[in-house]
Image (cartoon, rainbow, N blue to C red):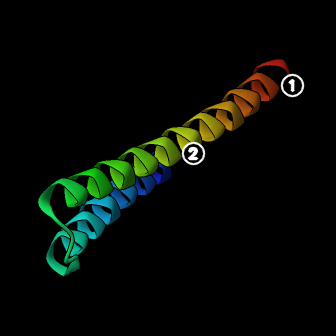
Amino acid sequence: MNKMFSFMAGAICGALIGGVTALLLTPNSGEQLRSDVRERLETAVAEARKAMAEKQAELDAQFEKMKNG
């Protein structure tokens, strides 16, 4: 559980840092910039959810193995 929390915290911090960096370094218009940031955030959230689901499935399998084993 601690590793999963650490991963999620790292993913969120990375997404925030990436977003701020994009805001500061991108010469796009405001609307284009907001669109890009929204897209990157949605991608980061989707990847985090996928990683969480994979880890949950792994932990469920381990739990069942220990329960039955």
Kindly identify which residue carries mark 1.
Answer: 69
Mark earlier in primary sequence (2, 1): 2
Residue 14, image x, y percentages: 33, 65
| Tag 2 secondary structure | helix
> Quadrant of the rendered structure where residue 42 is?
top left
In the image, 20 versus 57, the foreground residue is 20
In the image, 64 versus 13, the foreground residue is 13
In the image, 44 versus 52, the foreground residue is 44
State whether residue 17 is above or below residue 48: below
Q: Looking at the image, which residue sits at the far right? A: 69
Residue 57, image x, y percentages: 68, 31
Mark 2–mark 1 Cα distance, whole angstroms, equals: 27 Å
Tally the numbered discs.
Answer: 2
**Is 17 situated left or right of 8 in this image?**
left
Q: Looking at the image, which residue sits at the far top? A: 68
Residue 61, image x, y percentages: 76, 29
Numbered label attached to residue 51: 2
